[in-house]
Each structure stands twice: as C-alpha cells, then as structure tokens.
Image (tube, rainbow, N blue to C red):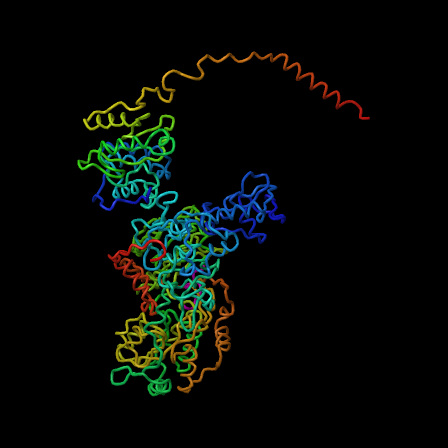
Amino acid sequence: MPKLTIDGIAVEVPPNTTILQAAETVGVEIPRFCYHDRLSIAGNCRMCLVDVEKSPKPVASCAMPVGEGMVVHTKSERANKARGGVMEFLLINHPLDCPICDQGGECDLQDQAMAYGFDRGRFHENKRAVKDKYMGPVVETIMTRCIHCTRCVRFATEVAGVPQLGATGRGEDMEITTYLEGALASELSGNVVDLCPVGALTSKPYAFSARPWELRKTESIDVMDAVGTNIRVDARGRQVMRVLPRINEAVNEEWLADKSRHACDGLGYQRLDRPYVRENGKLKAATWDEAFAAIASKLRGMPGTKIGAIAGDTVDAESMMALKDLMTAFGSANLDCRQDGAAVDPAVRASYLFNSTIAGIEDADALLIIGANPRKEAPVLNARIRKRYLKGNFTIAVAGEQADLTYPYKYLGADLAAFFANAQVPPGARKPMIILGMGALSRPDGAAILAAARAHAEKIGAVTADWNGFNVLHTAAARVGGLDLGFAPGAGGKDTRGILDAAGKGEIEAVYLLGADEIDTAKLGKAFVIYQGHHGDRGAHRADVILPGAAYTEKDGTYVNTEGRVQRGLRAVFPPGDAREDWTIIRALSEKLGKTLPYDNLGQVRARLTYVNPVFAQVDKVVKAEWKPFGTAGQIAPTPVTSPIKNYYMTDPISRASRTMAQCTEEFVLGGSKQKPTELKSGTHG
Amino acid sequence: MSTRSLAKEQPASFAFNADMTALAQRIIAKYPAGRQASAVIPLLDLAQRQEGWVTQPAIEVVAKMLDMAPIRVLEVATFYTMFNLSPVGKTHVQVCTSLSCWLRGSNDVVKACKEKLNIGFGETTADGKFSLAELECSGACVNAPVIQIGDDYFEDVDYASTGKILDAFKRGEKPAHGSAIGRAGAAPAGEAITLTENPAPPPKQDFAAAKAAFEKAKAEAAAKAAAPKP
C-alpha cells in the first residue's frame, strides 16, 4: 500500500486511490466541482489542483492516483494560486445573480468563491449567455450558470441509466442539454438538482419559494415506496417546502426518487382538516365529539365479527398498533394491512422481507425478477441493481412485465405458470437472488406463486447458511411494519378480500379504514365506514365518519422498509386544522367506545410495539429472518403478470393531490405535453 | 463561431444506400466487439458524404447501428465543425481565416469568394450549387492561404487564383488542387534557399580507442577503490 504525505500528515492508502480520496481519509478537504464519490471521475473542473513535490505543474487531485512517497501540499501558495486562477476563469462566464438564484446559500461555487475568489474582475469582454433548456416538469434550467462539470450527464448515464443528457458543442459553446430538449425521463431526475454544484439545474416546483437558511430541517423517512428512503423535510412555518435525501449507505446511498421528492406539494391540497359525519347522505363538518359519538352509537355493542379494519400503505406502525389493539378489544380478527391482498405469510417473516437487504444486492451474482418492475416500484433500489450490473458478472432475468429497467436482462415471458414449469438454474451463480413483486403476489393465485418462488429459490441455491436471496419487493411503506406487528387476519378473521366480500353481503357492518384508499370502495356495500386519514381521497369519499389524521411529515412515526429495517421519522410540521396524530385519535376513540387503550404517550405505544415484536426495538438495523416453510402449493394461472403500478407518479393520496405529480403524469405517462417551452429565455434576466 | 445545433428543418428519414452500408459494415468490423462506438466519426462522415450534411434522422440511424444513445452521437456531431449540421451547396467552399492564412492575405481570398459567389459566410447560392463557410485553422499553414473545396485543399491562393478556381467550378470543371503557384507540396517557392549543398558525411569514430580509454579509467577506479584507506 503506497505511503504518502499530505500537508505533513503521513497516510497509507490502497493503491489506485486518488490523492483527493486519500486527503479525505485524513480530514484534509480539497475543493471540487466535478468530482463526486458516486460518479465516474471526469477531471474537468480543475478546482482540486494540489501541489505535488517534484511535479512541474499543479495536479488535479481527483484524477491523480497516489504514488509511493508522494509529498502533497494542498494549501501551498502554488496550489492556492492555481485554484484562484481556476475560480477566476469559472467566474468569467458565471453570472453574478446570486441574489435571484435558488442555489444561493447552498451553492458550491458561492462557498468556494469565498475562499478562492478574486475580489475584482479582470475580464472586460461580454459574458456569454446560454439559452435555457427544457428538461421536464421537475428540473428548472438556467444554463448561463452552468460551469460544465458534467455531473448531471454522468448521473443520467451511469446511475439513472437514461443516457439523455449530454454536452453539445465545444469550448466556449459547450452546452448541457437533453437530446432534442426532451424531458429527462427518469424516476431519479430530481437528483441532478442536488448534484449540480451551481444554480444551473434547480428544482422547478421549489423555484423562488424559500431560502435554505429560512428552513427548519427535520430528519424523516419517506413513505412513497417501501424502500424507506432517508429524507430531510425542509419546512417553513407550517408548510413543507421541499424534501431532500439524507445519506444512508444501506438504504438509498444519497439518492431520492422523484415522487418522494416532489409529491410534498400534495400535502397542501385536499387535506382533511376537521372531522366529518355523513348525515342524510351528505358529509357534514363536525367536532371531534360529534364524530366520536357517531362512531360510538354504531359500534357500541356490535360483535367483533361484524367489524373489519384495513390499514393503508403509508400508515405508521404506531397507529396500526393502536387500531389493532382496539380491534382486539372488540374481539375482531378481521384486520389486514394488505390492501392489494398480497399473499405473503404474516406468520413467517422471511416470506415478506427483502432478505438479502438492499446493500446485499451488490454481493449477489445473479438476479431473477418475478412479477416486479423495480424501476417503477422502487426507483432507488433499481439504481442499486443497476450499480451492481455496471460492476459486471451479473446476470439478470425477468419473468413478468417487459419494461425498460435501465439494464439489459433475459426475458422469460409474463406467464408465471410456464416460467415455473421450465425454470432453469442460472449456471455458476453462487449468490443468486430472486425479487418477487407485488404484481405476482397480489393475484388470486399469489399463495401458489409464493410457494413456487420459495421452491425455486431453494432449487437455485438462493438460500444458504450465510446468504438469503429470497426477496419480496413491497410497494407500500406501511406493509412490513403492519405485518411485523400482526395487522393481519387473526384466527378465523377475514383478510382484505374477505372483509370487502362480507361488507358487500352485509355480514360485516362496520369497516375502519386507516388511510386505506387503494381498495375498491364500491365493494363496501352498506357497511358503516370510518375513514381516518389525511387526504380527501377514495376512502374519504365513501366514509360515513371522517377522522382527520396526520400525513407522514406531521407525526413521529415508525416505518419498516421492505428489507425489515425499522426506521423512525420525526415530525416536521403540525397537522392542519383539527387533524391529530393518528395513534392519538384511536386512543381517544377507544375511550369513547369504552375500550380504553393502555397507553398515553408515544413512548408507551412504542413499548407496546416492542412487546408485540422485539424487532421494533432494533431501530436502523435489519434483523435476519428465519427461513421457514411458507406459501401454499397450488395451481398458477397462465395469465400474464403485470406490475401493480400503472402510473408511477400517482400511487397514494399525497401524490394524487400533488400538482407536480400531475405535471409529471402528463409529461411521462400521458405521452408528453405537446407544448414545448416557447419562451426563449436566455441569460439570467428571464 | 456560434453554437452549433441541428437545423430546424429536417428530412423525415435517412438510410444508408447499399454502397455506404457495405462501407459502414467494413468500418464497424475494424473495432473489437463492444467497442463499435469508435466508428461514430467515420459513420457520420459517410452520412455526410451521402446527404451532403448530417441530418437528425442520420444521427439516429448511426446511433442505432452503433448501439449508442442518440445524444452521444449528437455530441460528436456538434463537436466537430467538419460535420455540416445544415444543408450546404453542391460545392462547399471553406476559407481558412485563422492566423497564418490571415497574415498571408486570406481577407483577399474571402473577398474573392464573396464577390464571385455573391453570398456571405454560412449562405448558399440560390441555385444550391455553392455554399461558403469560414474554416478554423485547416492545418496547412505552410501553404497559407488555403481554401478547402470538398476534400481538396487549394493552397497559396490569392484574389486572382481564387477567382479562377471558382470560375472553373462554375463551369463544372474540376481544377487541379494543391499549390496555386506551383510549389511542390510544402517546398519553397522557386529555388531552394537552404540546404542547397549535400551534407558532410558524419565524422569517423575510433571505437577501439574509445574502448581502451574506458577500460583504462575503469581499471584505475578499481585500483583506487582497492587501495588501503589512510
């Protein structure tokens, strides 16, 4: 391992490390624009120049591998002068429009100009101006500010796998653009805004709405898919202004999917901010007491077998725990957190987890995707699969929907019956993995598919003593948490399909929908429906009593992601109006129903969660699930399997209420808005 | 030079003709499997030879042939000024106006072109036969000033000879390319003025004496090393 000295500190690093990486290991910071840990090295901004002894010129530390005995000075006069020169060249064409730039306050160029900038300009010619480009509904461009670091181009090509961005022209005329100025068709496109070191690519929905120093930053967990992406919610006053990713190497690295990032404007529309009670067929605003009284008059004395409860996809574990305890107090076993009827086995944790873990994808050497479209169902996880694919020696096969997943794969057809009949063992794979999607499991024959997939996983050697490659990819953030705490039919209880059937027939007379909007509400028949949730969506339209709850940014909640990782989000803002945190609503209702739940604060609810399943005490960890028999062998129908997500941009009440997601739907799902940007903006003055 | 971008009006489609397809396949075959993207420049050149300019459909056809994203091909096409991104005349006249040519009188050459063809830079004559473009250094400074017509360089031109060359093209002839003042390649005009004599033969070297001197020095050094230290 080469030894070198950086600013007088001796350091030993593996060969092929660059000087910049070596400097980071000893805490020496080198300024940079184009270099990024997760992208290939470009070496074109020249900001990271350092002084290496015996080298005739300053060297670009991001692209220079370390050598034995190198003596590097990062703060010498020569290095500083070189960087000052680079900065002066960058600022020749960069507009001085920081006061009207959205990047202001969190701009790499601004920060580094404070350190290396020259206080006067020596360039008396005109600055260049570049025509702004159209890149879709979420990325705003002010291309005059671009410093051509090509981070966005490398991100689109390497991580997102949509090579649509490029640099045309040369020299002073180089411009970053998409091919023919089409929208950047990626579910990860918002990340180019984070990557852009200047204000050339900024967030379109967030444009001109806040300054970073006005925002209150709260760490939270995303609920738009089951990946459990770590996010930071930036709020001003009572409004969530934007959502940004946090770094978590085990989950999302530092990426965030577009829906998770930009659906937050949906938190401001269609909100349920007071209770409602249906009177003479019409919903009427009510007080909490009136709403509780309406529920109590129906539910008091009703036998548990006539009550059902369904939990939605974005619900926190605490409120599901409270509702489960309430249902148990009524003696009802009719409860389910699987709105789509996914046939996983709630009793066997390994049957519903992404057992290999998300980071484990990088250890696998063969992948079989059954009935899933990871690009739509979990874009960040899909980026991890692509990362593994780019490393090479990774065979991917897909049985299910034939979609562009951003990596090539062997297509095995959409007929799962035929697939399992002829399934082959991938030759030479030592750590194969299977990803089983909701498209397959939520079919009526899901249990048979689960059993067949389990058998296939064992056949191909995906389950060994130190490797479990049997993975279920959920689409709902609440799902694993719900299953972990047992929000599933108890002995003799009915599942989602059973509850809906029974409600239609009149056997179940009251249904409690906890944020459940993805069910066919027409099937509820004449049942008395209590809807607790945050948006006026499908569930609320059918409800007889509406209890206004909190969205994920408005409560302290526990979520378990698809790999079984327990994560906690913090409250960023308060719920609007009379709305309350969900578990407190159920706790208050339980008192009115005469079945008071035994917890009065969040700590006690969480203690209850831990009592029910010790997994909930293991925050931020993945507890390995034991491999047991599950699934019911049976006939698999020869119908083609499809992904449950038809429109990635609208899958839950929040994204359905979001204007940005509506624009994305128009652009990417409905075939693109014909209207191209007509305004010929150039420069920075609009 | 301004930003190079695709022409507004584009043909509906593009396809290589049979000859060009065969040539393209030969070019692609030169590169190892998986490296066929290396053929992008020659293929764009073939497309330009066939159509006269690089069209958007051609970019997409080349991208498809080489398994590249269209933006990657567009990057190449916009980078090299030799690719015409909008239609040019049948005879495309490019005048070098970079430093050497300018010092040697390219202004006169430009004037001759503009007068003869009655068009400016970036324009095409009404009959579509001629177009005129400004060329960055054509790399033939030793024969400055230079105009490039098609693949041929017309060197050492001035106002008068440029006019003659263009007149010949107007008549449909193909005038001889190369130096307009009769220089052979880059040789001096007229008589040679340097290196007029044959060079003297190299001096004879006495290798035997050199070897003896070397051996002697070596022996002395060894003796010195072996001598007892005081």
Q: In the image shown, does A584 or B19 lie closer to the viewer?
A: B19
In front of the other: A188 or A307: A188
Q: Quadrant of the C terminus of chain A?
A: bottom left
Quadrant containing the N terminus of chain A in the rendered view: top right
Tell me if residue A521 comes above or below residue A135 in the rendering: below
Give the residue furthest to the right: B230
Occupied quadrant, residue A370: bottom left
Residue A353 vs residue A191, the one in the foreground: A191
| Residue A455 % position (x, y) | 39, 57
Regarding residue A597, the answer to whether it shows in the image is yes
- A219 lies above or below A250: below
Between A516 and A651, the residue placed more toward the observer is A651
Tell me, yes or no, whether the highlighted magenta stretch contains residue A351: yes
The magenta stretch spans which residues?
Answer: A346-356
Q: Mainly helix, strand or loop, the magenta region?
A: loop
Q: Is residue B206 above or below residue A234?
A: above
Query: Percent position (x, y) of residue A534?
Result: 36, 74
> How many numbered badges does the structure rendering display?
0
Q: Is residue A523 left or right of residue A364?
A: left
Seen in the image, is B144 located left or right of residue A49? left
Estimate the x, y position of residue A136 in percent, counting from the top left: 32, 57
| Residue A519: percent from left, percent from top | 30, 71
Residue most extreme to the left: B127
Asked whether the viewer can see residue A386, the reply is no
Q: Is residue A66 above or below residue A477?
A: above
Quadrant of the rendered image containing residue A209: bottom left
Look at the image and say whether residue A233 sits in the magenta stretch. no
